[in-house]
């Protein structure tokens, strides 16, 4: 969409007499920019830098590298080992699932020796941990016992077949293997039944302890500060302001309503970031592993309890409950969708994790893009501002698509080179936005915003937000992807309906 009045924005940045320290840390951003100052704290989710003009809180996903005191990047191996030690100190070392998840984190970063150490620790704590055993190269399925481990109850009931059957009952496995194991146990002589019952109850106690550890870990992910009622009030206030702002945008009079929605979102955003920190500290693969372990422990205990009940050996104690919100959050962090009956705040957190997945995808696109196709810092800043604005008004963030970047750059370059400012182009094959998207290899439907005048990304963004038609286009819920191109004082913003994450 075009706006005939051309707004020229002049921006003047004034430094109030403050100078950066002679020696300073340098935080290099994925956008290509840098922040200089003193890094005062680092977490998995954010980096806090004290600069000459104040304190900057930078989301971790936007940090490419940190150079200390201008001396260049830290040695990667030293940094990885330091982070490993920090993570190891933060977990319960007697928790097999925690050690396994840490092993996956190390494996993803190429630290094979350290990863193997953690997988071995997981197996030592839980000899039937099938996933850790598979990482160590164990074969034969869930019914095989790790080297050096004694199956529960094997000492009470003689015979290798009985020991193997008890291992299958404990570790779970295919229905055929479980049926064979129970047939083996049911065929024991009557004189061995008391010892078998004791062995099976030992297996039950082990599985209950495993499930309780897993449930405790799930509850840890839900540990929150402050009352739930305060969160719900903040959420309800933002949703009301958001709905009013969207109605104002549709009517072409959004300014005051949008600012109120942005202010309400800032509070919700801060609360969500704090509550999601334990989940976001898990890599997606580790989150999937934790959830898989939770569900596996619950399923194996349920199967055992049902089998014991049929044989008149069941206890009256209910199994430990797994918190449904934790399972849903872990699924969302892993990029999956899990049906769950959630309250409003937990449902909003699950939605937010989907948004965070898009933002992480955008960082990965920038890092993997060939230099010639990589968006410039200004273009990336425009994408960031667009997504920030969409989030504040309840719209999902947009995926960065290099094909849309190519189409947007091409049109901005053509307008600058040929001296026109319009969505219609005189360039053959690029006459319309649809033509330009198709030429860039984008087959889906799309849209376009253009601006002339602003030198800075924020000024161009505010120009679009100040134009009702452009603003509605920027917030269109149909859009799933975005690309921005700049040529001097000309900006083009291309939108599309295709999602790489859904493919």
Image (tube, rainbow, N blue to C red):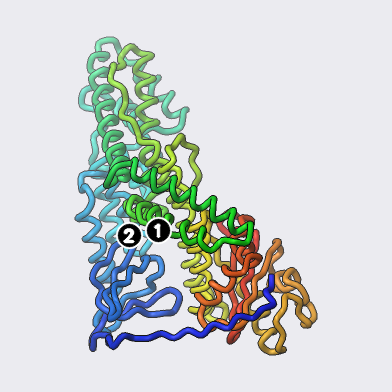
The dot on residue 151 is none
Query: Is the N terminus in the top left, top right, bottom left or bottom right quadrant?
Result: bottom right
Q: Is residue 65 visible?
A: yes
Quarter-of-image position of residue 418:
bottom right
Q: Decide which of 387, 281 is in the foreground and name it.
A: 387
Q: Decide which of 35, 470 is in the foreground and name it.
A: 470
List x then y, in percent, for residue 461.
54, 72
Q: Is residue 286 above or below residue 144?
A: below
**Of the image marks 1 and 2, the number of the one nearer the N terminus:** 2
What residue is at 49 percent from the left and 58 percent from the top?
Answer: 391
Q: Are marks 1 and 2 in contact (CB under 8 Å)?
A: no
What residue is at 31 percent from the left and 54 percent from the top?
Answer: 103
Query: Is the C terminus in the top left, top right, bottom left or bottom right quadrant?
Result: bottom right
Residue farthest along the top direction in this orientation: 190
What residue is at 43 percent from the left and 51 percent from the top?
Answer: 333
List x then y, in percent, for residue 185.
34, 20
Q: Is residue 47 above or below residue 270?
A: below
Q: Is residue 282 visible?
A: no
List x then y, in percent, for residue 15.
34, 86
Query: From mark 1 to mark 2, how far is it between C-alphas?
Result: 34 Å
Q: Decide which of 215, 94 is in the foreground and name it.
A: 215
Provide the secondary structure element on which disc 2 rests: helix
Q: In the rendered image, which residue does mark 1 sit on?
A: 266
Crowd tier of the residue under label 1, counting other residues whose Cα lies within 10 Å: few below 14, some 14–19, many 20 or above = some
Quarter-of-image position of residue 78:
bottom left
Q: In the rendered image, which residue does mark 2 sit on?
A: 106
Provide the secondary structure element on which disc 1 rests: helix
List x then y, in percent, for residue 306.
38, 20
What residue is at 37 percent from the left and 80 percent from the top?
Answer: 34
Crowd tier of the residue under label 2, counting other residues whose Cα lies within 10 Å: few below 14, some 14–19, many 20 or above = many
Front tag of 1 and 2:
1
């Amino acid at each position: 969409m075009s706006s005939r009045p051309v707004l020229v924005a002049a921006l003047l940045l004034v430094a109030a007499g403050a100078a950066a320290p002679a020696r300073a840390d340098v935080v290099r951003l994925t956008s290509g920019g840098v922040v200089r100052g003193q890094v005062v704290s680092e977490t998995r989710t954010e980096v806090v830098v004290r600069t000459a003009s104040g304190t900057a809180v930078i989301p971790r996903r936007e940090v490419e590298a940190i150079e200390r005191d201008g001396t260049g990047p830290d040695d990667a191996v030293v940094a990885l080992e330091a982070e490993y030690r920090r993570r190891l100190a933060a977990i319960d070392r007697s928790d097999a699932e925690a050690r396994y998840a840490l092993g996956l984190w190390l494996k993803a970063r190429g630290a094979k020796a350290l990863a193997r150490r953690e997988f071995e620790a997981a197996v030592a704590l839980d000899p039937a941990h099938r996933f850790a055993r598979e990482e160590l190269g164990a074969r034969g399925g869930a019914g095989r016992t790790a080297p050096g481990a004694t199956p529960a109850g094997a000492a009470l009931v003689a015979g290798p077949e009985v020991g193997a059957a008890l291992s299958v009952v404990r570790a779970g496995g295919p229905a055929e293997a479980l049926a064979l194991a129970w047939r083996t146990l049911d065929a024991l002589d009557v004189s061995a039944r008391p010892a078998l019952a004791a062995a099976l109850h030992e297996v039950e106690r082990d599985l209950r302890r495993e499930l309780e550890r897993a449930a405790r870990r799930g509850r840890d992910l839900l540990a929150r500060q402050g009352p739930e009622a305060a969160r719900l009030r903040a959420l309800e206030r933002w949703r009301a302001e958001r709905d009013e702002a969207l109605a104002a945008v549709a009517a072409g009079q959004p300014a005051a309503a949008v600012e109120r929605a942005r202010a309400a979102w800032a509070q919700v955003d801060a609360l969500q970031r704090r509550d999601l920190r334990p989940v976001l500290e898990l890599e997606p693969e580790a989150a999937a592993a934790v959830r898989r372990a939770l569900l596996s422990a619950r399923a194996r205990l349920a199967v055992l309890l049902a089998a014991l009940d049929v044989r008149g050996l069941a206890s009256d104690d209910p199994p430990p409950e797994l918190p449904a919100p934790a399972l849903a959050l872990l699924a969302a962090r892993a990029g999956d969708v899990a049906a769950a009956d959630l309250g409003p705040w937990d449902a909003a957190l699950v939605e937010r994790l989907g948004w965070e997945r898009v933002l992480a995808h955008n960082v990965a696109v920038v890092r993997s893009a060939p230099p010639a196709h990589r968006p410039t810092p200004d273009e990336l800043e425009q994408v960031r501002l667009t997504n920030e604005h969409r989030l504040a008004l309840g719209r999902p963030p947009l995926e960065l698509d290099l094909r849309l970047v190519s189409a947007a750059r091409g049109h901005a370059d053509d307008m600058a080179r040929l001296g026109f400012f319009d969505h219609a182009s005189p360039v053959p094959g690029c006459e319309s936005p649809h033509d330009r998207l198709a030429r860039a290899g984008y087959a889906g439907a799309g849209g376009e915003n253009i601006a002339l005048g602003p030198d800075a990304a924020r000024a161009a963004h505010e120009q679009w937000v100040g134009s009702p038609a452009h603003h509605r286009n920027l917030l269109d819920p149909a859009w799933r992807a975005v690309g921005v191109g700049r040529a001097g004082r000309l900006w083009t913003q291309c939108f599309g309906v295709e999602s790489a994450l859904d493919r």
